[in-house]
Amino acid sequence: MKKVLLSVFIFCLAISTMELSAQINVPASSPGATVKQMVGLVDVTVDYSRPGVKGRTIFGDLVPYDKPWRLGANAATKITFSGQVMIGGKQLDAGEYAILATPGQSSWKFMFYPYTTWNFGAYLEDGVEPVATVTAQSASMGEIMVENFLIQFDNITSNSANLWFIWDKTAVAVEIKVETDKVVQANIDKVMAGPSAGDYFAAASYYLSEDKELDQALTWVNKSIEMGNEMYWVYRAKSLIQAKLGDKTGAIATAKKSLELAKDAGNMDYVKLNEDSIKEWMM
């Protein structure tokens, strides 16, 4: 009986030890990361891992030239678009895509595949074709060295952004384009069938930011004000439109109105913006 109890005790102890071992968490040598950026009206999210240089020669050695690379380590790098984008002249619909790249000594070829698996090797099998490819020139960063592989966004506008891939002393970027103006214009056309004061202001502000059809923008902002939207930021937008149209006298008068309303609201940032503009337009 004692032997049976001892055997049961040893078995339970072994199971307990195995369970404790399974609960031990250790950091990944190439930790995962996520970077997210709004480009125009499209959310772009990249999930990837960040291996380190660790004293090694990276490009041309650890990452061979002229061979496909997963852009990181572990799983395939995944990029997600919430709306349509253009890459390398190809339109990609909203969805998830795997990105691979073939680094070269002076340029890289990037390949985008519909995301089906974390296993990057599956995208290299015969018959699997990318939905978009783009070649970009790589650049040396001189004495600047980035230890951990980095993906980041830069040069962000309402219509595009550069997606940078940076590691060691090498950097390369892919341009992502979005058709913001087409989408916004369609929305404006739809809403303007029965616009509110806020709709008029939003449309005028967009035209101001894009520097397009400023006469129409002025008409819309005036409509917004006529409908009771007499806020300091609305008058501020009107003054900027007037100035761009060459009506400095009108712009100054409108800016003074915005300034007084901003003072009443206690928004000193807008007070200074208007003071600076009035001073500039009076020169």
Image (cartoon, helix red, strand yellow):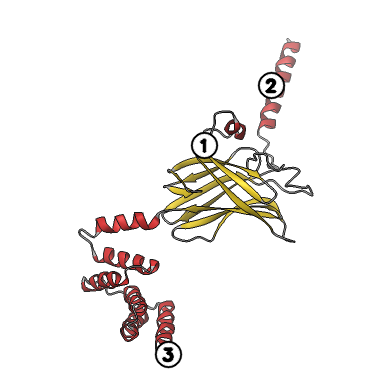
Where is mark 2, residue-wise? 12
- Measure how far apart labels 3 and 2 are at the Cα level: 88 Å
Say which residue appears at 30% left-offset and 55% top-offset.
186
Asked if labels 1 and 2 touch by Cβ distance under 8 angstroms, the answer is no
- Measure how far apart labels 2 and 1 are at the Cα level: 44 Å
Earlier residue among tags 3 and 1? 1
> Which sits in the foreground, 201 or 129?
129
Q: Position of residue 89 (x, y in %)?
A: 48, 48
Say which residue appears at 42% left-offset and 87% top-offset.
279
Q: Residue furthest top?
A: 1
> Which secondary structure, mark 3?
loop
> Which secondary structure, mark 2?
helix
Q: Position of residue 266 (x, y in %)?
A: 39, 78
Question: What type is the residue that disc 2 sits on?
Answer: Cys
For residue 280, what is the image quadrant? bottom left
Where is mark 3, residue-wise? 283
Q: Position of residue 55 (x, y in %)?
A: 79, 49
Total marks drawn?
3
Earlier residue among tags 2 and 1? 2
Where is mark 1, residue-wise? 115
* 23 relative to 233 in the view: left or right: right
Asked if labels 1 and 3 touch by Cβ distance under 8 angstroms, the answer is no
